[in-house]
Amino acid sequence: MATSVTDDNPDQSGALASSEAVAIREVIVRTPGVQSVDDVRALRLEDQQLVITARLGFGRSTPVADVVAVLGAVRAGIRRAVPAARDIVLEPEVAAPRADANPPTDVFVIRGAE
């Protein structure tokens, strides 16, 4: 689930500090329930506050209540890690199946009762 934070400050006058970018990324990828992350962006406003946007992937069978709870946890985590984050816009979407979702059958061990 590799992701980077894109800094949307074309003139770099209010560029995102690397520590802020790392903190945002770490919060998102370490929040349980987030299956994938895409298109994380940060924009620093004139008052030095940040607007952060991201698309977060969830499994097809994830209940809506769980998605809402995870989005809230990500927002709270970002605000704790980066106090300058004013607006956090998270877009949930159905994630593609994980590469490890269908392991080969030779890794299964079935024990019999003895």
Image (cartoon, rainbow, N blue to C red):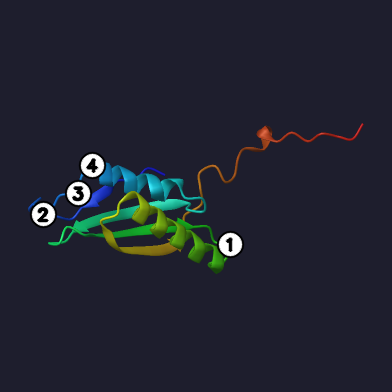
The earlier-in-sequence mark between 2 and 1 is 2
Q: How many marks?
A: 4
Q: Would residue 107 appear left or right of 1 to someone viewing this image?
A: right
The earlier-in-sequence mark between 4 and 2 is 2
The earlier-in-sequence mark between 3 and 2 is 2
Which quarter of the rendering shows the N terminus?
top left
- Tell me the amino acid under the disc marked 4: Ser
Q: Is residue 45 above or below residue 28?
A: below
Label 3 to label 2, Cα distance in Å?
A: 11 Å
Q: In front of the other: label 2 or label 1?
A: 2
The earlier-in-sequence mark between 1 and 3 is 3
Label 2 to label 1, Cα distance in Å?
A: 39 Å
Q: Would residue 84 appear left or right of 71 to someone viewing this image?
A: left
- Tell me the amino acid under the disc marked 1: Ser
Which quarter of the rendering shows the C terminus?
top right
- SS of the residue at dot 1? loop
Q: Which residue is mark 1?
A: 61
The earlier-in-sequence mark between 1 and 4 is 4
Q: Is residue 94 visible?
A: no
Q: Which residue is mark 4?
A: 18
For the residue carrying disc 1, how many other residues have a C-alpha within 10 Å: few (<14), some (14-19), or many (20+)?
few
Label 4 to label 3, Cα distance in Å?
A: 6 Å
Q: Is mark 4 in CB contact (under 8 Å) with mark 3?
A: yes
Q: Which residue is mark 2?
A: 10
Q: Residue drawn 37% across and 52% down?
A: 80
Location of residue 83 (image quadrant) = bottom left
Which mark is drawn over residue 16?
3
